[in-house]
Image (tube, grey):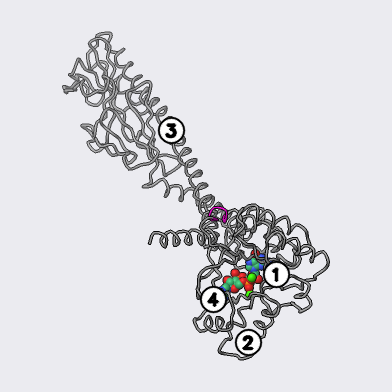
């Protein structure tokens, strides 16, 4: 679970910034695409404007010629000279209304020209001319009174303009009314820009035409990749390096005591409870509080993985302080439904017994639960030797007055000496699970249990046997006269809150029955 959270965190740290940076760069790419597209279109509009201006100029020259009333024969040669002299213009025609009567190609002639086809009466994009039917042509129309001049601009000049782009991926097309001239010099009535990206339309201010510019790619992401491959790879590489760094930060081993200090600040140590039962009735007479570390990444951590370090660094004292406080708080809520007396065993390290803080903490606990039937049992674990000084003796004396009871934990495995048993006014001996496990297997364990029972009787101590896993073990211990049992046979340790809730519910069910 903890590992999972860490992995999710690393994956998020890798992908989220990656996605964010790529989205940002992609947005920038799209923006520059639109900008560039517009710049292309503006440039082409200017160039087409200047070409069409030549058409208008040649129209004006032709109209000036007929203002003297000359016939077509007279002005025709002048018109041909103008066609040769003025760039881009292929033909000049003169008309009255819709009837062309004079052309620079054939002189006097009669053709019909529909003025309605001219957009704003000025421009007409034709798929081809009478001479070259395959080549689109743009006709520029100028009207002065009754007289009309029409000049033809060869579409090939425009085609050259549309296809001569610095960046080959940009495609430019020209629209006059609903007719289009594409970058391939194709004449069409269909908008050729539908499949392009970042399409920009720029209208001419002088003539009724527009230029469309777009990027020739099926997807903006594909275009982004094609254009900025190098940067994308660099971004991804940086991101991977960043993730490796985060992963290293998250996983590098920190000294355990630093982690424990952090966990104390974050209140990560929580009480679990395992019931202690009466060996005859098998009813719950109390619980042992067992510390668990709710680690943000590693989940629930067993105490044997951190208690020895906590004892070595002295941090076990603030940790036990937290545990006692939290246990007292949770018990207070359920104190009315607990049996009387209800024993609450808490493990206390020997070093804790050299400080008067323990007395204050126990007072706080007892005041907190404010129920004299809840009895705090201090289980003195013996990983470190317990030095029973005068101070400790006084402390235990005060603890007894407060109503607490004292137990020697893991009896027979630690440093407990008979001298200590004499000095401390004990209440319980806890037989360690190692002896319980060997019942029926190894007769030395059974002898040890029997001797402990004998000793306890003489000293008027009660015995709790822990680690009871089978009915046979429970039966044997009961026969030996051991009063209290604890082990997986009855229940495994669970969060204290959960234990109290279950217990309360069971009591209610029994009461209702
Ligand atoms: P302990 O005080 O001897 O606690 C009993 C241990 O035996 C607990 O292990 C419990 O879960 C386990 N146990 C109980 N019944 C059975 C069973 O039937 N079979 C087996 N195999 N195990 C059983 P846990 O909770 O892992 O605690 C280990 C030790 O850590 C404790 O041994 C105690 O010495 C220490 N510890 C736990 N909480 C604290 C604490 O708050 N302060 C201090 N100083 N030590 C603590
Ligand atoms: Ca214990
Ligand atoms: Ca034990």
Viewer-nearest of labels 1 and 4?
Answer: 4
Secondary structure of the residue carrying tag 4 is loop
Q: Is residue 344 above or below residue 104?
A: below
Numbered disc in front, either 4 or 2:
4
**Residue 487: image location, x then y, percent:** 55, 74
Q: Tell me the quarter of the picture where residue 481 sits.
A: bottom right
Q: Foreground residue, 211 or 146? A: 211
Q: Main secondary structure of the magenta part?
A: helix
Total numbered badges shown on the rendered structure? 4
Distance CA(mark 2)–CA(mark 3): 92 Å
Q: Which residues are magenta?
A: 330-335
The front one of 333 and 268 is 333
Under tag 2, what secondary structure?
helix
Q: Residue at x 21, y 24 (%)?
A: 117
Residue 232 location, x and y as percent? 52, 51
View extreme (right): residue: 390
**Callout 3 touching callout 1 (CB < 8 Å):** no
Front position among marks 2 and 3: 2
Dividing the image into four quarters, tell me where ligand 1 lies. bottom right
The mark lying in front, picked from 3 and 1, is: 1
Determine crowd level at label 4: few under 14, some 14-19, many 20+ residues with C-alpha closer than 10 A.
Answer: many
- Mark 1 to mark 4: distance in Å? 22 Å
Asked whether residue 306 is in view, the answer is: no
Provide the residue designation for mark 4. 279
Confirm or reject: label 1 Cβ below 8 Å from ligand 2: no
Q: Which residue is mark 3?
A: 38
Q: Secondary structure at mark 1?
A: strand
Q: Residues within 10 Å of mark 2 (few under 14, many from 20)?
A: some
Residue 380 numbered tag: 1
Q: CA distance from mark 1 to mark 2?
A: 22 Å
């Amino acid at each position: 679970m903890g590992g999972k959270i860490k992995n999710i965190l690393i994956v998020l740290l890798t992908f989220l910034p990656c996605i964010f940076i790529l989205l940002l760069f992609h947005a920038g790419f799209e923006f520059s695409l639109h900008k560039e597209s517009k710049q292309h279109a503006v440039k082409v509009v200017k160039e087409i404007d200047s070409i069409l201006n030549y058409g208008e100029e040649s129209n004006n020259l032709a109209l000036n010629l007929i203002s003297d009333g000359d016939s077509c024969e007279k002005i025709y040669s002048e018109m041909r000279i103008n066609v040769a002299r003025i760039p881009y213009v292929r033909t000049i025609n003169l008309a009255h209304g819709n009837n062309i009567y004079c052309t620079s190609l054939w002189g006097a002639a009669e053709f019909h020209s529909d003025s309605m086809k001219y957009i704003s009466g000025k421009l007409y994009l034709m798929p081809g001319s009478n001479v070259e039917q395959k080549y689109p042509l743009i006709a520029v129309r100028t009207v002065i009174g009754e007289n009309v001049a029409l000049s033809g601009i060869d579409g090939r000049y425009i085609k050259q303009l549309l296809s001569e782009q610095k960046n080959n991926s940009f495609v430019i097309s020209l629209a006059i009314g609903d007719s289009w001239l594409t970058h391939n010099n194709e004449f069409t009535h269909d908008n050729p820009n539908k499949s392009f990206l970042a399409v920009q339309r720029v209208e001419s201010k002088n003539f009724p035409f527009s230029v469309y510019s777009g990027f020739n790619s099926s997807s903006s992401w594909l275009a982004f990749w094609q254009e900025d491959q190098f940067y994308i790879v660099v971004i991804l590489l940086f991101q991977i390096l960043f993730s490796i760094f985060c992963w290293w930060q998250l996983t590098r081993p920190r000294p355990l005591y630093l982690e424990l200090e952090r966990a104390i600040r974050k209140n990560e140590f929580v009480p679990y409870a395992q019931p202690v039962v009466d060996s005859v009735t098998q009813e719950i007479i109390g619980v042992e509080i067992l510390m668990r570390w709710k680690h943000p990444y590693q989940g629930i951590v067993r105490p044997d993985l951190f208690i020895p370090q906590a004892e070595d660094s002295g941090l076990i004292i603030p940790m036990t302080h937290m545990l006692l406080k939290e246990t007292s708080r949770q018990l207070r809520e359920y104190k009315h439904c607990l049996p009387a007396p209800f024993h609450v065993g808490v493990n206390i390290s020997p070093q804790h017994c050299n400080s008067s803080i323990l007395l204050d903490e126990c007072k706080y606990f007892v005041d907190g639960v404010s129920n004299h039937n809840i009895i705090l049992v201090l289980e003195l674990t013996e990983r470190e030797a317990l030095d029973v000084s005068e101070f400790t003796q006084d402390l235990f004396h005060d603890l007894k007055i407060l109503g607490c009871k004292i137990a020697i934990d893991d009896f027979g495995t630690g440093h407990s000496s008979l001298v200590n048993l004499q000095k401390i006014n004990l209440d319980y001996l806890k037989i360690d699970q190692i002896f319980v496990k060997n019942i029926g297997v190894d007769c030395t364990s059974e002898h040890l249990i029997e001797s402990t029972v004998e000793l306890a009787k003489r000293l008027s101590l009660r015995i709790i046997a822990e680690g009871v896993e089978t009915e046979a073990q429970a039966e044997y211990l009961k026969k030996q006269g051991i009063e209290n049992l604890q082990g997986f046979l009855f229940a495994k340790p669970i969060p204290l809150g959960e234990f109290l809730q279950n217990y309360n519910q069971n009591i209610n069910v029994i009461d209702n029955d």
